[in-house]
Image (tube, grey):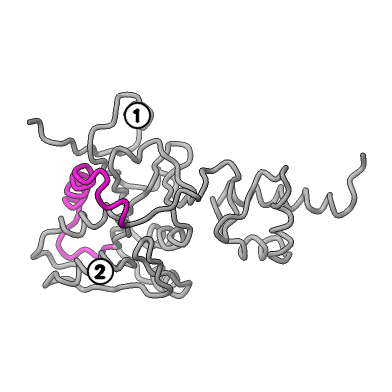
Amino acid sequence: MLQTAGAKARTLRLVRMQELINSKGPTQLGKVAEQLGVTEMTIRRDLASADSPLACLGGFVLEATLPSADEKYSLDEEIDHHTVRKRLACQRAAQWVEDGDSLFIDCGTTMIHFAEALPPAMTLSVVCYSMNIAAIVSRRPNTQLILLGGLYHPSSATFYSDEAVHYLGSLGVNKAFLSAGGADLQRGASCSNFHEVAVKQAAIRSAGQSFLVVDESKLGRVRPAFFSPLDVFSRIAVGGVPDAALRKQFKGLPLDVAAPPVT
């Protein structure tokens, strides 16, 4: 059966969207519509049918096969998970900070331990967008704090606005320390909250060096919101001891494993 003109146009849009998502990962709905020169409603209709390889979730266009966002991230629920391994990863990553550095510190329960692990007397500039990170950094006597503002998201205690992302891009921090809900060899680094993606990506673009800080449970895991391939990170601090299969899978990447002490 011959396709109608409307069906052909939809097929072409889906192809172009697939190319865009393959290149950039999950992308804001408005940016996809702008790129294709159509309305957001047109994009939503294109993605609504059962045969679409893409979906619209949380205002982002993404692969329909990615894990469901129904599994919500909650800072309160995550804070006690894998605490020892998170602390080990952060203590290792804190060793890469030098006096006078300008840092971006990501959000999440892992990065609480990173902020606490920074040597107290060290002179630093710190950019963050998380309430709990700001609370820790603000108590440091020799640290200049820049807290990015915008709409507050209670689930992750973070702020977001387009203006903040633009401002972050103009700052030029020399080291960015990022957390992730998943670090997969093929899918890259991902998180649960779509509003964090633009902030994380702006930090990576702005920084002279970027570092990923995760506990070993995040390796091989994929969350809904992709934000970076793994090869952009200068080093990846891993708390805990990944099993042999995972270590083999990530061979070739700059993993720095912080194992717990033998008792």
- Percent coordinates x, y for residue 172 in the rendering: 34, 67
Residue drawn at (26%, 65%), measured in percent from left and top?
Answer: 132
Segment colored magenta: 76-103
C-alpha span from label 2 to label 1? 34 Å
For the N terminus, the image quarter is top right
Q: Which residue is mark 2?
A: 134
- Percent coordinates x, y for residue 128 in the rendering: 31, 66
Q: Picture quarter containing residue 106? A: bottom left
Residue drawn at (23%, 41%), measured in percent from left and top?
Answer: 239
Q: Is residue 229 above or below residue 37?
A: above
The residue most toward the top is 244
What amino acid is at disc 2? Ala
Identify the mark at residue 143; answer none if there is no mark.
none
Left or right of 84 in this view: 25: right
> Which element carries disc 2, helix, strand or loop?
helix
- Percent coordinates x, y for residue 4 in the rendering: 90, 50
Left or right of 30 in this view: 93: left
Identify the mark at residue 246; answer none if there is no mark.
1
What amino acid is at disc 1? Leu
User: Quick one: label 2 or label 1, which is nearer the N terminus?
Assistant: 2
* Front position in the image: 3 or 101: 3
* Front position in the image: 146 or 134: 134
Residue drawn at (40%, 59%), measured in percent from left and top?
Answer: 200
